[in-house]
Image (spheres, grey):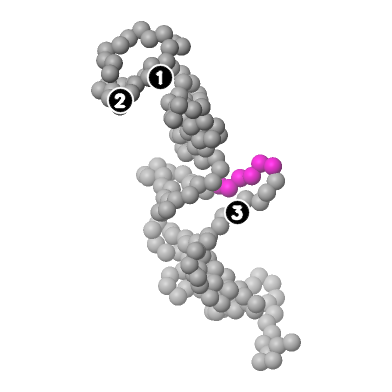
Amino acid sequence: SVTNFKNVLDDETWTFANPVTCSDNLYLAATKGIYFDGGSNTYIREATGDHINFYTGGNNVMTLNDHLEITGNFTSAGNISADKGTSSGDIAITAKTYSGGDPSFVLNSAAANRSGIIMFEDNGTYAGKIVYAHNGDTMKFHTGGSGGDSLTLDANATFSGTIYGEADVYAYYSSDPV
């Protein structure tokens, strides 16, 4: 092991056979990184002031600054929460493509006959939801409290409650639709 060394030349490489313990701060020169497995494809480095980049396979896959940027695919085995805490302002989840392709937000259940649900709240209180119901292959739009207004879209549109329109509203009913 090596202890209490100083004045290391900038281009000198030190190799340690045992774990290194640092009892104080560890400083790296600007834009220098920490490399893993002796290679040059997996590392962490400061790209610019207050921007830390994480690289795997030689690609920048994540940047930490005053917010988190993830490049490529992101997988989570648990819940993902975006919370601004007590600060005011909007929060957004953005899907952006640069050269073709359609940005998508995918809800996928690996279990059979499950639903995809996007829920909305006002100040922590249920305000509505959009539900894709696999069982029945329908899309439902709900507003208000429990059992509030809803709109169900399937092969035929089903409306529960009163239908309002700012122009003429036409309805047709037949027990034997054509």
Per the rendering, the mark at residue 18 is 2
Q: CA distance from mark 1 to mark 3?
A: 39 Å
Residue 157 image-quadrant placement: bottom right
Q: Which residue is mark 3?
A: 104
Three-letter code for the amino acid on which mark 2 is drawn: Asn
At which x and y percent is residue 90? 48, 46
Frontmost of labels 1 and 3 is 1
Q: Work out whether mark 2 precedes mark 3 in sequence or the reverse, and give the earlier one.
A: 2
Amino acid found under the numbered disc labelled 3: Ser
- Does residue 103 appear to the left or right of 87 in the view shown? right
Please determine whether, in this image, residue 139 is positioned above or below residue 106.
Answer: below
Q: Which residues are magenta?
A: 94-99
- Lower sequence index among marks 1 and 3: 1
Q: Position of residue 127 (x, y in %)?
A: 45, 64
The C terminus sits in image quarter: bottom right
Mark 2 closeness class: few <14, some 14–19, many ≥20 residues within 10 Å = few
Using residue 19 as the reference point, say whether residue 144 is left or right of it: right
Describe the element under mark 1 as helix, strand or loop. loop
